[in-house]
Image (cartoon, helix red, strand yellow):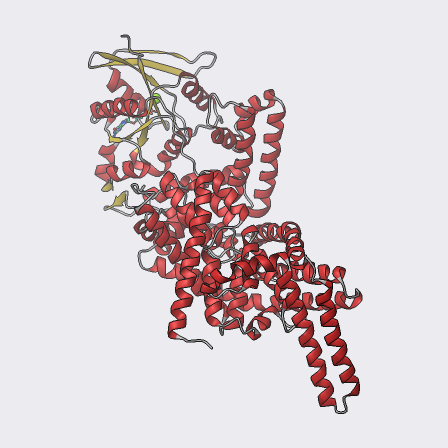
Amino acid sequence: VVEKKLTLALAGNPNAGKTTLFNALTGARQSVGNYPGVTVEKREGYIQVDGQRINVVDLPGIYSLTAYSQEELVARDFLVNERPHVVIDILDANSLDRNLYLAVQFMELGIPLVLALNMMDEVRKSGKRIDTPKLSHLLGIPIVETIARIGEGKQELIQQAIAHVQETQGRWKPLDLSYGPDIDAALMDMIELITSHHFLTDQYPPRWVALKYMEGDFQIKMLGQKAGSIGQELSGIVEKLEEHCRVTLDTSPEAIIADYRYGFIASVTLQGVITVTGHRERIAVSDKIDRVLTHQIIGPSLMIAVLYLMFLATFTIGEIPMGWMESFFAWAGDMIGRLIPDGLVRSIIVDGVIAGVGGVLGFVPLIMIMFLGIAFLEDSGYMARMAYMMDRVLRIFGLHGCSVMPFIVAGGIPGGCAVPGIMGTRTLRSPKEKLATLLVTPFMPCGAKVPVFLLLGAAFFDNAATVLFWITIGAWVSALLVAWVLRNTIIRGEATPFVMELPPYRLPTLKGLCIHTWERAWQYVKKAGTVILAISVLIWGAMTFPLLPREKVEEFDAQREYIQTQMAQAQTPGLKQKHAEEIARVDGLQAEASLKNSLAGRLGKSLEPLTRLAGFDWRTNIALIGGFAAKEVIVSTLGTAYSLGGAEGDPSIGLGVRLQNDPQWNPLTAISMIIFVMLYAPCFVTVVAMSKESSWQWAVFAVISTTILAFAASVTVYQGGRLFYPLP
Ligand code: GDP
Ligand code: MG
């Protein structure tokens, strides 16, 4: 049996000690030539290990794997064309951060990699200490300390390299870094294009090709041009992204990518990998800020303060424009109600369209302020630090620091959306941690659930902001507990070390913040304008048809007529007033009878015996069923149900007041509903996103299990509450 010869490539920054190590390894068994067509030097040699011959290639010194220079191009072509079995990246350990930058790019390419921390003699002399086992554990890569000049560590290095070849079996496993929301979104589009066109996919991971495009790699761009339309489409996406980054962050994609790579390194070295015992060396501004902001005690306290402040600001400022929006829609409903004669057309416009869409748009000012806060946290780089600090806590529950981003984006600070949150779980590198995160992310109070909470909070408790604060805490606790249960039962497995991207701190620009806020808000409005409008009308239809039978309508008409004749004969204003109230009562009864008779009413009614246990009547049931389609629909459906069927038919009375006056509703019902809405099945779009990120089986599992959990929790709280606070 002839074994395939092992090839081992030495790579690293210039002056890291490659050639010295190469000489130490190969001795005299070497040859020097040039790479074909270029004047870049090519050194090759071999070593003998246990009778096996191993080829060693000394690659030219490089700083990056992007083709900026001839050296870089040669080194990269060698890696993808010759596919050496393993790369030994030699790092000058004196400046570990800077040297790790190349290592990270090898990791992104996915090629089997072993690191040599060279110049350890100088490091030790300088009084710096490097925790190599920890670094190796965090990066998930074998690392050996070397002093190339005296050959120290070279035996172990070769052994580790051979062991790594056997372990990886020639498989390339690319590391996916996150580069922040702007770049990640464009990357996703590009990856889809690259994969479907099979553009260079036999040589590089698709994500890597997309990144090189963003970094302006001339070789890859040239290949794209030759490949035709795919090149133009990719360039188009990159140009748009460049413009976007320039306008929002005043920088280029290339710079952002570098920032996040350094951020990834920072999150490794921040964890006590390097200790300086001797004199203090100069440290970057971001590192200085990090010493305070991620301090063991100051850090978490500050984080809670920041979140709480954001919360207060949102509500104190948001209340004012929200009031305007509410009165505007009430006024619009009233006006149009007067212009159009009574009947189905008026009903569809006032009760369907205006009540539905108005219920959703009313919250836009508030949600925009929340988005502004989130944009600030993201653009400034603080969000990533929150992940870093949260890792210690999340770890206890079997999650990872990177889980915090999906949570926050999905509404961990109320007002997000679960769909980008679910997509954000891609930054989690362990499949089990990803799955656990994915399954509990939808518990967070997303922008569509917030209106439900605010409505009930304002109607039944003193302070809606405080209520939402406790709901947010409750959502986090639920997510963590459920994750803990999952990680100890069906998705058991080991935890992975915390390594993620900590980009440098930057002062966000006002323009950038506004654009990022607007992008999110616009998505929300668009959804209200299309999907929710359609669903509102659909639900209106289900709540209107079949119409009440003619005899029933005539019965109500007769009652009204009878009261009217009495009213005409009434002597005193007091008596007249009483009759007018009677008529309103009959109107209400008729509306309620029609709603009960409708399709939605019947469905809600048939579920009522069960949902009564949690305190939900048939109207609430209709709204909750609508919430499966989109959570925004809950408030709009409640609005429609209570304006169609409420005894207090006056449309100028807010929904909150109508609920307060309804005998079915009390604080306990409100709490029960809040819990149910917090936990039950994610909306349809989220379920689709979940199935894409995991599998449809897990998505179905999520829908069923969360609804059961939600119902159980609501029933427990409602029934328990009734024991302590007996209600009339
Ligand atoms: P290359 O550019 O990566 O090929 O680096 P070289 O092998 O040419 O080494 C650059 C310089 O670093 C030379 O002067 C080496 O003697 C020195 N050097 C290499 N390894 C070590 C080491 O482990 N310790 C110390 N102190 N110097 C080293
Ligand atoms: Mg050299």
Which residue appears at 47% of the width and 48% of the height? Answer: 703
Q: Is residue 574 left or right of residue 217?
A: right
Q: Tell me where residue 583 sits by quadrant.
A: bottom right
Q: Tell me where residue 452 sits by quadrant.
A: bottom right
x, y percent for residue 46: 28, 13
Which residue appears at 61% of the width and 36% of the height? Answer: 239
Q: Quadrant of the N terminus?
A: top left
Regarding ligand 2, which quadrant of the image does it lie in?
top left
Q: Is residue 634 above or below residue 51?
A: below
Q: Nearer the viewer, residue 523 or 356?
A: 356
x, y percent for residue 153: 21, 27
Q: Is residue 161 left or right of residue 587?
A: left
Which residue appears at 62% of the width and 22% of the height? Answer: 228
Q: Nearer the viewer, residue 633 or 141?
A: 633
x, y percent for residue 154: 22, 24
Residue closest to the far bottom: 572
Residue closest to the far top: 1
Q: Nearer the viewer, residue 197 or 622?
A: 622
Q: Is residue 260 left or right of residue 574?
A: left
x, y percent for residue 149: 23, 25
